Image (tube, rainbow, N blue to C red):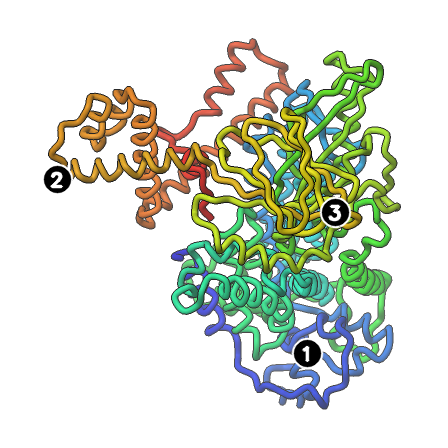
Amino acid sequence: MLLITHHLVHSCFLLLIFFKSTQLFHVSDVVVVQLLGALVSSDGEEQTAKKDATSKKDKPQTKTKMEHIFGFKKEDLTSWRSLVSLLNRPTDPASLGIFRCLFGLLMAIDITQERGLSHLDYKYLDGAPVCRFPLFNFLQPLPMDWMYLVYVVMFLGALGIMFGCFYRLSCLMFISTYWYIFFLDKTTWNNHSYLYGIIGFQLILMDGNRYWSIDGLWKPSIRNAHVPLWNYTVLRAQIFIVYFIAGVKKLDADWVEGYSMSYLAHHWLFDPFKVILPVDLVSLLVVHGCGLVLDLTAGYLLFFDVTRPYAFFFVSYFHCMNSQLFSIGMFPYTMLATSPLFCYPDWPRRFFARFPAFLRGALPFTTCDLQPSTSCTPPVAKTPKLRLRHKLGAIFTVLYIIEQFFLPYSHFITQGYNNWTNGLYGYSWDMMVHSRSHQHVKITYKDGKTGEIGFLNPGVFTQSRRWKDHGDMLKQYATCLSQLLPRYNISEPEIYFDIWVSINERFQQRIFDPRVDIVKADWSPFQPNPWLMPLLVDLSPWRTKFQEIEGSLDNQTEIVFIADFPGLHLENFVSEDLGNTSVQVLQGKVNIEIVEEKKNFTLEPGEQIKVPAGAYHKVYTVSDEPSCYMYIYVNTTEAALQENFTKLFELQERIRNGTETEPLPPELQPLIAADDGEGAEVNATDPIVRLFLKRQRRMKEVKKRREAGVLERLERFTIKKYYSVRRGFLMTAIALRNLAVGLPPLEQLTREVAFANMKEPQAEANQDERLKDEVGHTEL
């Protein structure tokens, strides 16, 4: 909450200083303007151009209503020549320079974090049998030490962008290595990683080093020089598209009805809303409703002077919340850095002019004496001479914006990448629209010569779990397995996948046909996937019934909803811990085979049967329509354990307050010394008592961490990041040394890696996750 408050106060401070109030005009009588026109200018840019064309003493010209609202005249869009002149209008480079600096800084941090420098050796360990998922199969990672060199080049490029040093070369260093790493692994794709890459591509074409850059110190001719307006147009259009298309994608029925991200309502960030609204309404109205409205309107609100302060407040609050809700690295801070691009381009000059005079030597320029630039059209000429670079800049702007609007809807071309959701996740801006849960994943292999059948652990030979939802990755995974399994005396293997997925709280159902050998299956990036099973959208209304059924159960009873296709069957094993498991049919007709007992039972809607624990059974769909049924079960082992924990906790409380009068047996004596530390659980002889004491200690540690003050949290965060970054740089130094002088003796290399792996003293990593695993519940 402190982080959120800080950003909100900072945003409001900037707004109060720099945003002048303007009259809100009605646009009903304004000529309808193309979206490109709304993107290319602002009132502030026109003011900047006029400062160079007229004296301050001149009487300002009267602006039309359209100029007040959009920052340009209708005549600027009446011909191609006037549009080129508009897009190349001289504009203050200050805002672009500040964004360049912030973007470079955030990318330098991102390289050590989300790009994976700190754990690069785990991902690209030489000689390890690993299945990878590049966009193009010919792309392969370099040897590990050379991969570290790739990251060094990318990191130096990010630093060069930040400082504006050898600007074009730095941009090239960054984007060439960034896109190589990006294309190397589709499993890490997401929208914001794609956004970083295209912003880097945009910057290499822009004059981002005209303000507060080392290049400007070396080359006075470019220092504080104008930049063409299209530099801002492209960046603003890109951010508008990120918001707006994300909002359009959220018009999906699942999002509007509140099924996409319903679990978020349980997060502590939404506790203030839960004071006045129940959780289900917080999910529907706040999480989904407000998210939809913000994405649809943020791009528009940022453009206009009168609405920009409100947009700054809400998008800042939104991104600060996202930084706490999701592990998405630098994305919230990058989006915060893009917001000032919509302000007047000279806002940094006014901002830094308010600092004390003795600091201004180290701060960006505050003078308004801008140099002319050949990249721009002359500001005073009525019919400026247009050069080739001016026309190319305008052509690039128009084509790029069209392409960015088209790409999120281009999935009819790359149909092979379409699954239940369209396309490769990463360039569609469908952020958080779909949530998935996987109930059952089975990989079956068959020896092509002997016919022997066996099973593989899901995810064997890979470090990713994303292949389960994408047909193109499944094909790559099956091909890789077919090449690795012969090492284990499995000849000409056939690979079959049985993957059950629920998307947006629907039934668990198969996503791919389990009868198809994926090794030999056809797949093309431009043809629909023939072995993709259809999403049973007709069964979506059942989700309302799910909530009613789940609400009628007690806390110890769990339920799983299954839907299957005619002619297929589910083979399932019931753990011995699940001593009370039954199957109830909701729709269709099924036949249940108890394998060991060799018995068959036919069930119709409303009928139920108990299945034995510790044994296999099969559920066949025998109706002409898809069958729907549910497993109802109680984890009797966990229930008994929780009951014992409750009794031990009550006994411990009586011991502490002195109300326990009965003598304790030896196996319960450690409860008396439980507050002394780990010694009590070590001395416990009863396994349940030992587990209880261990659980209590961990819960106490988690509570202590959660109730820690701001300074303690900041210290813990800083130490964690320090050791993570430290490891990345030390491993990089080792790799560069290996490339320069060769590998050292194995003992020396072992000592160096051990030193790089050093953790903070008394590290308590992942306490929350370990507690979740032990007590068998999930905390959001």
Q: In this view, does 572 lie above or below 709?
A: above
For residue 383, what is the image quadrant? Answer: bottom right
Q: Identify the mark nearer the N-term, 2 or 1.
A: 1
- The answer to whether residue 155 shows anywhere in this view is no
Task: Give whichever of 42, 249 is nearer the camera.
Answer: 249
Inspect this view and state whether residue 279 appears.
yes
Q: Which of marks 3 and 2 is in front?
A: 2
Disc 2 designates what residue? Answer: 659
Q: Does residue 443 appear to the left or right of 287 in the view shown?
A: right
Question: Are the residues flagged by discs 3 and 2 in contact, CB closer than 8 Å?
Answer: no
Residue 761 numbered mark, or none: none
Q: Mark 1 points at which residue?
A: 71
| As drawn, 375 above or below 191 | below
- Residue drawn at (47%, 25%), measured in percent from left and top? 757
Residue 533 spot, x, y in % from top left? 78, 45
Calculate the distance from the C-alpha at mark 2 to the C-alpha at mark 1.
78 Å
Residue 608, horizontal then vertical, whole percent? 60, 44
User: Circle 3 sits on which residue?
Assistant: 424
- Name the element at disc 1: loop
Q: Residue at x 76, y 30 (%)?
A: 496
638 to the left or right of 631: left
| Contact (Cβ within 8 Å) of mark 2 with mark 1 | no
Q: Nearer the viewer, residue 42 or 526?
A: 526
Residue kind at label 2, given as amino acid type: Thr
Tell me the crowding category of disc 1: few under 14, some 14 to 19, or many 20 or more residues within 10 angstroms, Cα based: many
